[in-house]
Image (cartoon, helix red, strand yellow):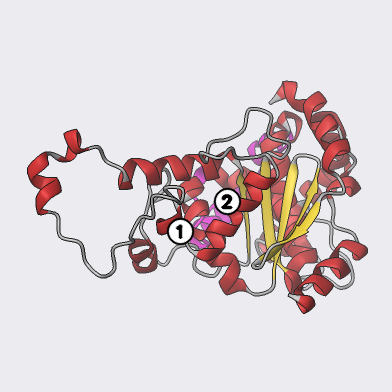
Amino acid sequence: MDGLRGSLHTAHHLFHDSCAMATSFWAQAHGPILTLLFRVTRTQHACLARVESHYESEKHAGKYLTWDEAHRERLCKGYEAFNLPLSTVAEWLASMRAQVEKPKEVLGKEAASTKQKTSSDPIHDPDEPFWHAHCSAQERELIAELTRRGILDGCGTLASSAPCMYLISATLTQADAALAHERLHALYYFSPKYRDLLAIQWNSLPRAIASAIELDLKMRGYKPSVWLSELGAYLGIRVNGTSSRRSDPSSEFGNKSAATCAEIRQVLLQQIPQCWKQDVGMDEAGVTLTRQDLECAKHAFSNA
């Protein structure tokens, strides 16, 4: 990731003003980050839950789940926002293809000839890409948008010169607070300096405070591999007067941890702007939706 700064800076100049309205979402690119806004949570979930689960689910990471399986597992229940590397979409499509296009030599002629199709089995149209019959309308829109932007190629693989590398999303009504949180997950992905900073802060926690935060994160369903990123996203968030989140993020993990978290928060707020500049090549404000952006999205939804 250290060598990305130059290419990320170039991508910023090429795609800073690139925005579009699909039926399900409004999209805006800021350098290497693609932001999606949705009108309602249900649509966001239909678009991103299976991809997100493939990325970081403790139980289903790396696995392709059909819609029936995803429904039974109640993927991403309660999610208000999403974040994932855009390479995940290509990996998810590859897993899908491996599952739905098993060659006859693997299935065996007998298995292939005796397999019974039910009314719920998707019917593949040979004139459509392989994923078409296996995706929701919202997932197809996502793939089309990523292809239009040159992030995916026509086969659903990640383009070698993809202009954006990370996706964050929220509903329009939750955009301010939710995207501030999700942007910090993107920073964790891009910035070695930020990852090192969080590791230092985590390792300096008093044992009792660390145990309390660990228990809190476990109860929220986070696996250990994302604890550092979540610590930063909760404590490093910049809030404003209109945010729906609690006014003091230092209290995120309870009153007993608040004083220690306040110290960590102060360090993060001082260092995060440098992490954006050093490892992403952009100011923090350059990856933030403006009031004009939000009004544009609102207007687009009202006219959809």
Circle 2: element type: helix
- Residue 147 lies in the magenta stretch: no
Residue 224 at x, y percent in the picture: 50, 45
Circle 1: element type: loop
Query: Can you say which quadrant of the picture contains the C terminus?
Result: bottom right
> Does residue 245 appear in the picture of this structure?
no
Q: Which residue does the numbered mark 1 point to in the structure image?
A: 135
Drawn side of residue 266 relative to residue 92, left or right: right
Bounds of the magenta segment: 197-225
- Residue 218 lies in the magenta stretch: yes
Q: Which mark is residue 143?
A: 2
Tell me the crowding category of disc 2: few under 14, some 14 to 19, or many 20 or more residues within 10 angstroms, Cα based.
Answer: many
Tell me the crowding category of disc 1: few under 14, some 14 to 19, or many 20 or more residues within 10 angstroms, Cα based.
Answer: many
Residue at (58% x, 37% y) in the render: 153
Query: Can you say which quadrant of the picture contains the N terminus?
Result: top right
**Magenta-highlighted stretch: main secondary structure?**
helix
- The one of 187 and 262 positioned closer to us in this rendering: 187
Marks 2 and 1, how far apart at CA: 10 Å
Relative vertical location of residue 186 with respect to residue 3 in this rendering, above or below? below
Disc 2 marks which amino acid?
A: Ile
Asked if labels 1 and 2 touch by Cβ distance under 8 angstroms, the answer is: yes
Relative vertical location of residue 257 with respect to residue 45 in this rendering, above or below? above
Disc 1 marks which amino acid?
A: Cys
How many numbered discs, if any? 2
Toward the top, the furthest residue is 3
Drawn side of residue 274 relative to residue 115, left or right: right
Residue 200 at x, y percent in the picture: 70, 34
Drawn side of residue 116 relative to residue 148, left or right: left
Residue at (70% x, 54% y) in the render: 182
Q: Earlier in the sequence, mark 2 or mark 1?
A: 1
